[in-house]
């Protein structure tokens, strides 16, 4: 019997789409080529990196963070194997959880590599080479993305690693060179710096964290430098040579000038990710890609071929797990005849460094670019009681509101634990709330979220605690 | 001394009073603030801030113990930690000092005049302050009473010697070997937990049949479990009777009626707080009362024209951020703005381990209000973020109207979820329905995703459970 829906790829976009479709009564199958479900996020992305970020933060705390509280300990010893076991156990619990959810929702998990033969037909090739063809009324492409590479720098996952390799190094490298100062590079660079590596970051642009509000990025760069990381901005890497003991990179100023070399024990290439469309049979099926190689879709996730949809990293928009999940949910609802919708203006973004960065909506640069008049309210954690009590006074909250209507257009945060504070701003913006709405909401004391309220008050220049 | 005349006089410089004064100053109102003790009141000096500093330090110490024993999943080992409580307390005092001097600077910046001394009403427009340099008379067209609250003393167990209130508990320079806590409310359990983590043998004596009686059992269960793990003995249905003859132990009548004597270096009495209505000659103006509290209306007006009251002296919930919000509101009313108390939610946090957060109505409260509710619960066991941190206890619970899905309340218990409470409140204040929260993208991986999932579950289609 044909399925109502076949999804190719079981990452956060795919598996959420499958579960939602099954809930809506669609007979659903999901095709996965890896041995475990969950895609990049659960296996080699968000979840393992957060496990290492948390554990390495504890390690750094044990080494430096306790004395001010009146707690003295000897220099901590690291058992990296045990730390990696924590990471692996976390990943296993998560991927097993997805398998359980498939079972519970009566979704057929199909192991193998999927290829679209035509609308309604997917061929699955299992590892032993056997193929079978599944039929469905609708197909969703949720194949995600893969690490982008840099010409002249071949990733071997030993000396020259991608994020995948950087999550399973067997020892902290003495010196780690990170190519690309985006989220992944700075998160994993932070992990290894805390565990003892000397870390230098090389970035093509003249700033770190492109897409993040510039003021936040600049202040964060200063904090990372204080922690010991070094940055080389406006530099491009043109060549990598692997020797017995390490890697030598050839680095040139982007503006032109003399090339220099930099050596490290391990190089992490984190220059971005690219949509994964190869081997899917898209060309044969006639599915159109856009100029950047992503599957082209309309507002309802439909490709140009009726019955074929696409969601997640493989389509336009930020490559974020929660954006994929939301698309998965909306896509399943559309296919089931309901009204699914994703509001791309309100997708929060988090960088899990220390301190964390969290943002939603427009940056100041974007608003200036649009010529939209706005007001700014800012509040530093230095003036927040809970931050003082926790010794987490670095960073600030910034609220951007429309000058005429006071509608909140963007909220940007730098500080410890701000990942858990940004959802409030997202809910507010979904309601097209004003800075006054935020300012008039009772925020609990003593919490770091009081800084959000104060920043909202500061929009009208009426903050209390500064 | 020359009399002072001003537009607004604020009596008490806690989070209600000082915020009211600052906001009034911002609005151009000529304001005087009277305080006998330190700026910042209970909250900054002997309440929220110092307790959170001590709780945080105790958490760090406990973490270090796990590092030393190797009993952590993270592969980190250190030597056994050494605790210098005097150093911890000095650090805490440093924070308090910085914050109170910060308040002083803010008041100055807002052009608020501070008069140090204990104020007494002469009449509804006049207050006399005994200052170090003599009696200062202040006449004001409007007066705000923000005198706060104080710990309740048990008549058979008066404070003094080894019987202490939260104030003294936050200033101990040595961890007591045996600490008995009388009262299993949030203050007693927060401090009891902190001292247990710092190495004290802690016993909690509670007269009622459950811990944290203001919360429902579902929310307190993970806290009870953690208390047991920490080796804290909790005696329920037990009555403290007073010190024994030698004055070194607490006599307790246990639930089974038997007498027990609990040896204690310190006995911390945390049986609640009472409004501060004494000591400032409140009788002179004879305001209407609401039980022990000063009765106020939705604009914080008392029964006398031109006299307002805010904060703990006006009733429950005795929370700093409630007082702050009232203070802001009164300043704006005095400035002629149209304001009234219309908060749908004042979030409350209990900084136990794990933390408890509540906003809006609980399932029980919704039921009592005669509302048919839908409830969605999402456990942190199914949260990726909680798994990465090795802290899986607890859940988030959403309460919504069954007919139109309007969110009435959000509660939770879990590690570090205190920072989620404001978001719950915002959703309630914006009139969010379950679909609104379910339709808002929450960042991954965070604990906050549990709010979204709980909403989905109330709608009948959660993803991750």
Image (cartoon, rainbow, N blue to C red):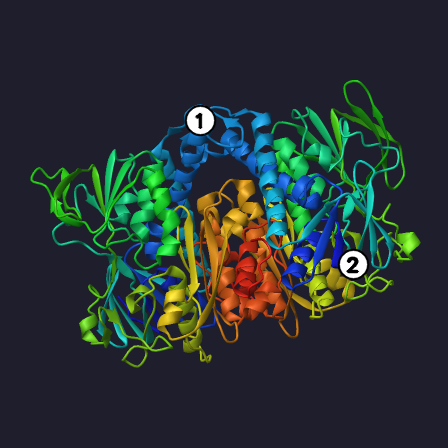
* Image coords of residue A403 (percent x, y): 66, 71
Q: Does dot 2 land on a helix, a strand or a loop? A: strand
Location of residue B248 with respect to A144 vertically, above or below: above
**Displayed quadrant of residue A348:** bottom right
- Chain letter, disc 1 residue: B
* Image coords of residue A349 (percent x, y): 66, 53
Q: Does dot 1 land on a helix, a strand or a loop? A: helix
Using the image, tell me which numbered label, if any, was put on residue B68.
1
**Which quarter of the rendering shows the N terminus of chain B?**
bottom left
Q: In the rendered view, does B245 fall on the left or right side of A194?
A: left
Q: Residue furthest front?
A: A1
**Displayed quadrant of residue B412:** bottom left
Badge 1 vs badge 2, beta-carbon distance below 8 Å? no
- Rounded to the nearest whole Å, what is the CA distance between mark 1 and mark 2? 57 Å
Q: Is residue A177 something that shows in the picture?
A: yes
Q: In the rendered view, does B204 fall on the left or right side of A187?
A: left
The residue shown at (25%, 33%) is B177
């Amino acid at each position: 019997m044909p399925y109502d829906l076949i999804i190719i790829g079981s990452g956060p976009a795919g598996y959420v789409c499958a579960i939602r479709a099954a809930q809506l009564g669609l007979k659903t199958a999901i095709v996965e080529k890896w041995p475990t479900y969950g895609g990049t996020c659960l296996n080699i992305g968000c979840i393992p990196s957060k496990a290492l970020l948390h554990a390495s933060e504890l390690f750094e705390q044990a080494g430096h963070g306790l004395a001010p509280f009146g707690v003295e300990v000897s220099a901590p010893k690291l058992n990296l194997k045990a730390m990696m076991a924590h990471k692996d156990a976390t990943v296993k619990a998560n991927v097993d959880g997805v398998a359980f959810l498939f079972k519970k929702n009566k979704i057929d998990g199909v192991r193998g590599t999927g290829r679209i033969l035509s609308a309604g037909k997917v061929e699955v090739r299992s590892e032993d080479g056997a193929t079978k063809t599944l039929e469905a009324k609708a197909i969703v492409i949720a194949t995600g993305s893969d690490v982008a590479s840099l010409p002249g720098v071949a990733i071997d996952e030993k000396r020259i690693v991608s994020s995948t390799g950087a999550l399973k190094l067997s020892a902290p490298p003495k010196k780690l060179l990170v190519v690309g100062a985006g989220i992944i590079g700075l998160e994993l660079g932070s992990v290894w710096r805390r565990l003892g590596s000397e870390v230098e970051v090389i970035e093509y642009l003249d700033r770190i964290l492109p897409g993040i509000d510039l003021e936040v990025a600049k202040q964060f760069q200063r904090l990372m430098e204080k922690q010991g990381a070094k940055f080389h901005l406006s530099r491009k890497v043109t060549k990598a040579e692997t020797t017995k003991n390490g890697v030598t990179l050839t680095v040139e100023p982007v503006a032109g000038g003399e090339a220099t070399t930099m050596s490290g024990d391990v190089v992490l290439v984190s220059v971005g990710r690219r949509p994964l469309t190869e081997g899917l049979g898209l060309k044969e099926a006639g599915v159109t890609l856009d100029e950047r190689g992503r599957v082209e879709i309309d507002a309802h996730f439909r490709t140009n071929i009726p019955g074929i949809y696409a969601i997640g990293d493989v389509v336009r928009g930020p490559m974020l797990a929660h954006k994929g999940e939301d698309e998965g949910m909306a896509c399943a609802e559309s296919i089931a005849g309901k009204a699914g919708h994703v509001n791309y203006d309100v997708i929060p973004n988090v960088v899990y460094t220390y301190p964390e960065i969290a943002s939603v909506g427009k940056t100041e640069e974007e608003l200036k670019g649009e010529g939209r008049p706005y007001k700014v309210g800012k509040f530093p954690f230095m003036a927040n009681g809970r931050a003082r009590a926790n010794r987490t006074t670095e960073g600030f909250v910034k609220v951007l509101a429309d000058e005429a209507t006071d509608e909140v257009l963007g909220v940007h945060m730098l500080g410890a634990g701000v990942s858990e504070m940004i959802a409030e701003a997202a809910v507010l913006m979904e309601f097209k709330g004003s800075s006054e709405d935020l300012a008039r909401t009772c925020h609990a004391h003593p919490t770091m979220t009081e800084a959000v309220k104060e920043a909202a008050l500061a929009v009208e220049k009426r903050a209390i605690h500064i | 001394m020359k009399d002072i005349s001003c537009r607004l006089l604020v009596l008490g410089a806690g989070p209600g009073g000082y915020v009211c004064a600052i906001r009034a100053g911002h609005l151009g109102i000529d304001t005087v603030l009277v305080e006998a003790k330190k700026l910042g009141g209970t909250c900054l000096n002997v309440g929220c801030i110092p307790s959170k500093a001590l709780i945080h330090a105790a958490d760090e110490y406990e973490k270090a113990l796990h590092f030393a024993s190797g009993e952590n999943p993270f592969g980190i080992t250190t030597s056994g930690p050494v605790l210098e409580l005097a150093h911890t307390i000095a650090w805490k005092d440093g924070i308090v000092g910085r914050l109170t001097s910060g308040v002083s600077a803010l008041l100055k910046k807002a052009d608020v005049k501070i008069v140090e001394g204990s104020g007494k009403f002469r009449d509804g427009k006049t207050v006399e302050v005994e200052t170090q340099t003599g009696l200062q008379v202040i006449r004001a067209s409007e007066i705000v009473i923000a005198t706060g609250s104080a710990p309740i003393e048990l008549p058979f167990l008066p404070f003094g010697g080894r019987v202490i209130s939260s104030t003294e508990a936050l200033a101990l320079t040595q961890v007591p070997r045996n600490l008995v806590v009388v009262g299993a409310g949030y203050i007693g359990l927060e401090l009891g937990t902190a001292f247990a983590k710092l190495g004290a043998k802690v016993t909690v004596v509670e007269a009622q049949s459950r811990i944290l009686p203001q919360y429902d059992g579902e929310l307190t269960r993970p806290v009870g479990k953690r208390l047991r793990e920490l080796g804290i003995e909790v005696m329920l249905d037990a009555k403290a009777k007073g010190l024994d003859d030698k004055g070194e132990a607490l006599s307790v009548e246990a639930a089974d009626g038997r007498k027990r004597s609990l040896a204690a270096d310190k006995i911390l009495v945390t049986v609640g707080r009472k409004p501060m209505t004494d000591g400032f000659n409140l009788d002179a103006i004879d305001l209407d009362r609401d039980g022990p509290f000063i009765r106020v209306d939705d604009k914080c007006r008392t029964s006398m024209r031109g006299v307002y009251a805010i904060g703990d002296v006006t009733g429950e919930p005795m929370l700093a951020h409630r007082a702050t919000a009232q203070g802001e509101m009164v300043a704006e009313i005095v400035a002629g703005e149209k304001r009234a108390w219309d908060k749908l939610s004042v979030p409350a946090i209990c900084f136990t381990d794990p933390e408890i957060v509540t906003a809006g109505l609980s399932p029980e409260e919704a039921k009592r209000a005669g509302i048919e509710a839908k409830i969605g619960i999402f456990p942190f066991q199914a949260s990726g973020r909680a798994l990465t941190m090795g802290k899986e206890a607890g859940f988030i619970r959403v309460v919504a109207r069954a007919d139109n899905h309007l969110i009435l309340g959000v509660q939770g218990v879990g590690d570090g979820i205190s920072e989620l409470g404001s978001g719950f409140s915002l959703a309630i204040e914006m009139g969010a329905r379950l679909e609104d929260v379910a339709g808002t993208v929450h960042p991954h991986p965070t604990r906050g995703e549990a709010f979204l999932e709980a909403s989905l579950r109330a709608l009948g289609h959660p993803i991750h459970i």
